[in-house]
Amino acid sequence: MLGKMGLLVDSAVLGAKTYLDAYYRLIDVRDVVVEHVQALEIPPASGRYCLVADDLHFSELLKIIHKHYPTLQLLEE
């Protein structure tokens, strides 16, 4: 089952003609894992840190996907 972002990317890959002109907040799940482990292993870190990331426009996300999977036919603009 795909989440909201997965569905948006899936529709872009499957030939959607447009995408939302919107920004999304994304985070690498590996970063979340590292921070959870640190919160467990370093008592002073517990409850003190918050993960934040930059906003990313959907067009930028498509550029990143294209960089890693150049054979996919994705939306241009």
Image (cartoon, helix red, strand yellow):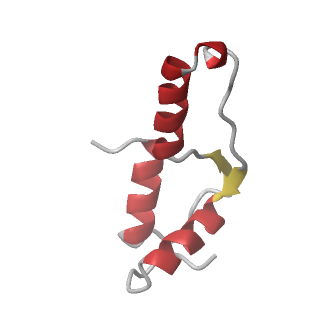
Location of the N terminus by quadrant is top left
- At x 46%, y 76%, the residue is 68
Query: Left or right: where does residue 23 sit relative to residue 5?
Result: right
Is 37 located above or below residue 16 in the figure?
Answer: above
Q: Which sits in the foreground, 25 or 45?
A: 45
- At x 42%, y 82%, the residue is 73
Q: Which sits in the foreground, 15 or 5?
A: 5
Q: Residue furthest bottom?
A: 71
Quadrant of residue 64 within the rendered picture:
bottom right
Q: Which sits in the foreground, 26 or 7?
A: 26
Q: Which sits in the foreground, 68 or 47?
A: 47
Is 38 located above or below residue 23 in the figure?
Answer: above
- At x 46%, y 35%, the residue is 33
Query: Left or right: where does residue 77 sit relative to residue 54?
Result: left
Q: Please provide percent x and percent y for residue 17.
A: 50, 72
Query: Left or right: where does residue 71 sit relative to residue 26?
Result: left
Q: Please provide percent x and percent y for residue 51.
A: 65, 33
Is 57 located above or below residue 36 in the figure?
Answer: below
Location of the C terminus by quadrant is bottom right
Q: Residue furthest left?
A: 1
- At x 64%, y 47%, the residue is 24
Query: Left or right: where does residue 1 sit relative to residue 27?
Result: left
